[in-house]
Amino acid sequence: MLYKVEAENRLDYEKDLYKKGYKLIGGVDEAGRGPLVGPVVASCVILPINYHHEYLNDSKQLSEKKRDELYDVIMKDAISVGIGIVEADEIDRINILEASRKAMMLAIEDMKIKPDYILTDAMDLPTETPYTKIIHGDAKSLSIAAGSIIAKVTRDRLLLELDKEYPEYEFKKHKGYPTKKHLENIRKYGLLKNYRFTYKPVSDLIKEDKNVVIR
């Protein structure tokens, strides 16, 4: 049974900003720091003032089915949504922290209607727009939670496309995370260009086998 979130209790940051005159509050979050393959994806979402949805929550607390349902709801109800994607090769080049930061900035730049204030999930951003970083923000701010859902669903769908191209890796099941089966498949079939070569155990595999196949 899905837990109903008391959404109004997670609008405190937004309500405080409304009182200060801000109307377009963007919640930004990323998905995909931990996987071995694929991009990191960020999204920034501006919800209507005092928006309420009983199931809107941190994407990690929701089932895949519920995330997909909420993705459609958010895309329909939001004032503005932006998405930023940073691919694996750039993650290797600039590191995952900087790649996550860049994805967030790309998401903000992607928005047709720009936020006048930003709430981030514990991330400093190189922006002139005023912002507040909130530790565990996806659990404390409805706007950030919305961003986390859009980012997560977007990234998962990219991995589903990769699964269609390379079904033997079973990306549909593990979404790129380092499960036992995933690691077995890497050893069996080799590496794809989509992998993050600086991530362990991928980097360890390359060290162990200098001739490992990269497809």
Image (cartoon, rainbow, N blue to C red):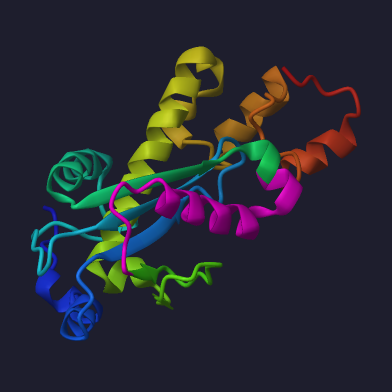
Q: Is residue 170 visible?
A: yes
Find out whether residue 104 is within the magenta segment. Answer: yes
Point 56% across, 44% down: residue = 35
184 vs 126, left or right, is right
Find out whether residue 64 is within the magenta segment. Answer: no
* Depth order, front residue of 108/85: 108
* Image position of 40 with respect to 121: above or below: above
Point 8% across, 63% down: residue = 52
**Which quadrant is home to the C terminus?**
top right
Q: Is residue 59 visible?
A: no
Q: Main secondary structure of the magenta part?
A: helix
Q: Which residue appears farthest toward the right when viewing the image?
A: 210
Point 53% across, 37% down: residue = 176
* Image position of 101 with respect to 71: above or below: below
Horizontal and vertical percent for residue 127? Answer: 50, 67
The image quadrant that residue 68 belongs to is top left
Horizontal and vertical percent for residue 133? Answer: 43, 76
118 vs 87, left or right, is left
66 vs 179, left or right, is left
* Image position of 17 with respect to 70: above or below: below
* Depth order, front residue of 10/36: 10
The image quadrant that residue 193 belongs to is top right
* Depth order, front residue of 206/10: 10
The image quadrant that residue 110 belongs to is top left
Point 66% across, 46% down: residue = 91
What span is in magenta? 91-116
